Image (cartoon, rainbow, N blue to C red):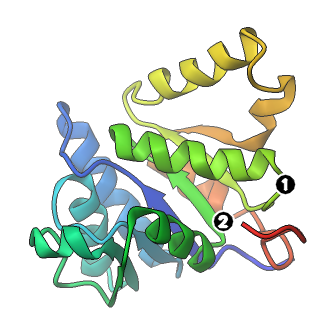
Amino acid sequence: MPEIRSVAVFCGSRPGALPEYHAAAMALGAGLAKAGMRLVYGGGRVGLMGAVADGALAAGGTVIGVIPDFLQQWEVAHAGCTELIVTDSMHTRKRRMFELSDAFVSFPGGLGTFDETFEILTWRQLRLHDKPVLICDIAGSAKALLGLIDGAVGDGFAPADAHEFYETVAGVPALLERLGTLHTAPGGVATQRL
């Protein structure tokens, strides 16, 4: 099975309330670059998005930003990306990030990060892909997201095996170590189309 060579990171377009978030995003970007893994992310220069890209670029990594046209017009695109892909919508952005990535990391963030994470988990539940999904907990940041999943399972709205669709990892060093041991599914996508 092929190694993980390209990782999509879903993270906040805001910096968050704790300095640990920024430091972790920089470390994640640098760690991916040092491991020879390409960063695929939302293309922004602000918040944790900008920090993870800056970390990867400073360490000599390859960074592919995928941003919808309206956000590029708001001048939030990162000018330093190795490649910047401009899409016609948020939906197309998520689809393109999926296509470019062998694995997914959910990092601290807000509603957009939740949206991206839940969509990729939903596609996994529907057997549209078998790519690894890792939720990285930084200073307790994953508690709310994991609580939503636990609540949906407990209330009977998500399958009991929903926890098998992802792994939770505490901190960037453990996340990078885990990414180094994973493989992506052959072709990454099941026979159904997204």
User: Which image quarter holds the C terminus?
Assistant: bottom right
Name the residue furthest front.
88
Mark drawn on residue 54: none
Which image quadrant is residue 68 in? bottom left
Mark drawn on residue 127: 1
- Residue ID at (76%, 51%): 124
Q: Amino acid at mark 1?
A: Arg
- Foreground mark, 2 or 1, reads 1
User: Which image quarter holds the N terminus?
Assistant: bottom right
- Residue ID at (35%, 77%): 65
- Residue ID at (72%, 9%): 155
Q: Position of residue 105 (x, y in %)?
A: 53, 54
Q: Which badge, 2 or 1, is on the more N-terminal residue?
A: 1
Name the residue furthest bottom.
83
Q: Position of residue 125 (x, y in %)?
A: 79, 44
At label 2, counting other C-alpha atoms closer than 10 Å, the crowd grade (few under 14, some 14-19, many 20 or more) is some
Q: Position of residue 106 (x, y in %)?
A: 50, 47
- The number of numbered badges drawn on the structure is 2
Q: Left or right: where does residue 89 sit relative to residue 103?
A: left
- Tell me the distance, in whole angstroms, between the alpha carbons under discs 2 and 1: 24 Å
At label 1, counting other C-alpha atoms closer than 10 Å, the crowd grade (few under 14, some 14-19, many 20 or more) is some
Mark 2 secondary-structure assignment? loop
Which image quadrant is residue 3 in? bottom right
Say if 17 sits above or below 67 in the image. Answer: above
Q: Left or right: where does residue 98 sit relative to residue 33?
A: right
Say if 127 sits above or below 7 in the image. Answer: above
Mark 1 secondary-structure assignment? loop
Residue at mark 2? 180
- Residue ID at (78%, 72%): 188
Q: Amino acid at mark 2?
A: Gly
Q: Position of residue 56 (x, y in %)?
A: 33, 74
